[in-house]
Image (cartoon, coloured by chain):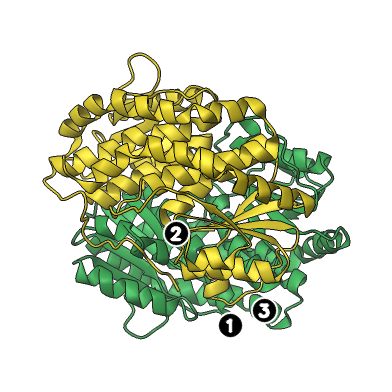
Chain colours: A yellow, B green
Amino acid sequence: MSSILYSEIFEQPGAVARVLTESVSEVQALVQAAKRADVRYIALAARGTSDNAAIYAKYLLQILCGVPVLLTAPSVHTLYGATVDYRGALVIGVSQSGAGEDICEVVSAARKAGAVTAAITNTEDSLLARTAEHVLLCRAGREVAVAATKTYTTTLTIFALLAAAWSEDTAFGAALQGVPEAAQSALSVAEPVVSAVAQTLFHAEKMVTAARGANLSTAIEASLKIAETTGTTTQAFSSADLLHGPIASVEARTPCLLFAPAGKSSENIAELAGKLSGRGARVITFSPEPGADVPLVSPAHELLSPLVDILPAQLLAYYLTVARGLDPDNPRGLSKVTITR
Amino acid sequence: MSSILYSEIFEQPGAVARVLTESVSEVQALVQAAKRADVRYIALAARGTSDNAAIYAKYLLQILCGVPVLLTAPSVHTLYGATVDYRGALVIGVSQSGAGEDICEVVSAARKAGAVTAAITNTEDSLLARTAEHVLLCRAGREVAVAATKTYTTTLTIFALLAAAWSEDTAFGAALQGVPEAAQSALSVAEPVVSAVAQTLFHAEKMVTAARGANLSTAIEASLKIAETTGTTTQAFSSADLLHGPIASVEARTPCLLFAPAGKSSENIAELAGKLSGRGARVITFSPEPGADVPLVSPAHELLSPLVDILPAQLLAYYLTVARGLDPDNPRGLSKVTITR
């Protein structure tokens, strides 16, 4: 239990509480600037785990604020040298290290074109922080484990702060304050269950994850985390897309991790669970409902569940790694900072 | 060889030639309307194979026209009932059947909000065609095989026509006219090679596909096609993302199909090929270079290669299906039209 990854997973409730307090004025200043500029849409530039956080933002900001959200394709700039006309946009680069040159290039080009620009980063003295006009800090403390955990959840928290300030939805804002407590109890409740589930799953060579709507980020991030730490082949799907075709390739006994938080996606996930079970797949539901395979703790607003629901999946990645006899802090073939040119 | 899928694959050069001639005025009218409205960005709503075509459009329109492109998340509307402010946008729904209610809902909401709206569909008398202001027809003829082929390439062709009209890039427009011929020779050149490759691959339980930039659409569509028709577990990656972490989960002997057309992505793909080979993966390159495992035919403009490079992958899906003793026209667990609510 002396793993760095394990420690960092449990640092998250405190890190989220810190960012809720200390980053709120940075977020408010950005929202004021964006509204003054009559921004028509938000463009997010990110890779890897940060890109998964951006997927949450895509749902959250569109649903709560009604503002269209675009995920950039950084290679449009870096590989093809294109000049995209970002007038009328708020462009946010997301990178925990702040070192991703491709992300910085998108933000830099947008700033020159007159867009409102911001950085979400855990590294105050980084290229990205120097490139963007506004800096929103994750304040997660130094992240040492190669598999990112606390920079992911603090990035989600910054997006939730942004949505709260933009929408002026006071119920959402109030619910957001309860996330650290929900996160704490989610870890406590899930850990014994997840460690037992890991014992039954660690031989699996393939796994599928699925969710719908705002928790698609959870399915994709869980898939990445398990692949990174354990080397398992994982596939993440929107439950709608999975039903659309790829379900044909899910074989009998394949573990399928389905995220079914309380709320609007639960019916769709139940339909998927039925069809996967019918194909002989091994369905493992993450849900706050009684009888779930892995219990979830619901925050006070449905759209905040991705901040909490990823925690049992991170723990599962950790326990799968241990069960396989691997070092959770040194996954094979990975480095902490990947720079894409 | 009497399969419908096989016949439809070979109908594509003719279908692309038809859409180049017959749909051009529809596209020009749309571009004029979008420019009149001073559109700031384009939003695309699609699922499944149509969504893969939208990924091509995301790269092509940003690179050639400098216009930002957003892929919508239909569940934002259908599941959460959100109202997204699409003022200043051109919103295009893409659906070969035109029956996708979620896609229609996005387009309908955008049209009410005053956005310029369009449908790309193969079905003239469809809900989507009735919902959008502008209709761009694929003119692919009735597609009977469950695995979409000719509606995919004709949709790409419509996006290429759109990019040509929007950018007024005459070199690109001229190169586009040569695509049917390139497609015809791509099929002829690839078929004997692909049928032999399929014999060596058909036992594989997992496959990886990768590309970068505009051909990301090709990697994702190839992955979907092989998964749908053969039931193989497939994973599609941007080569940049694969190097970012998931490469750790690629096991020795896993077939990795790498799309390396001539142009800006080829260096990155070569780097990936080296790293995958170093891990003991079985690298299969699709490239116009001598020594490629599967030969590609290059159209006269790099950004048109996705219209041609998908053809050998479709043939591979077909020959893998046959080699496995499956019926290519009746994949297990799939229906032609999936309606997501």
- A199 and B188: which one is in front? A199
**Above or below A25: residue A114:** below
Q: Could you tell whether A96 is left or right of A233 in the image?
A: right
Q: Quadrant of the C terminus of chain B?
A: top right
Query: A32 or B301, which is in the foreground?
Result: A32
Residue in front for this viewpoint, B324 or B278? B278
Q: Farthest residue toward the bottom? A: B290
Element class at badge 1: loop
**Location of residue B249 in the rendering, given as x and y in whole percent from the top left corner:** 25, 55
Residue appearing at x 52%, y 75% in the figure: A79
Q: Which residue is mark 1?
A: B300
Position of A6 with respect to A337 (left or right) is left
Question: Please, which residue is most extreme toward the right here?
Answer: B36
Chain of the residue that carries numbered disc 3 in the rendered image: B
Q: Which residue corresponds to mark 2?
A: A123
Numbered label tally: 3
Q: Residue B187 at x, y = what percent?
A: 46, 71
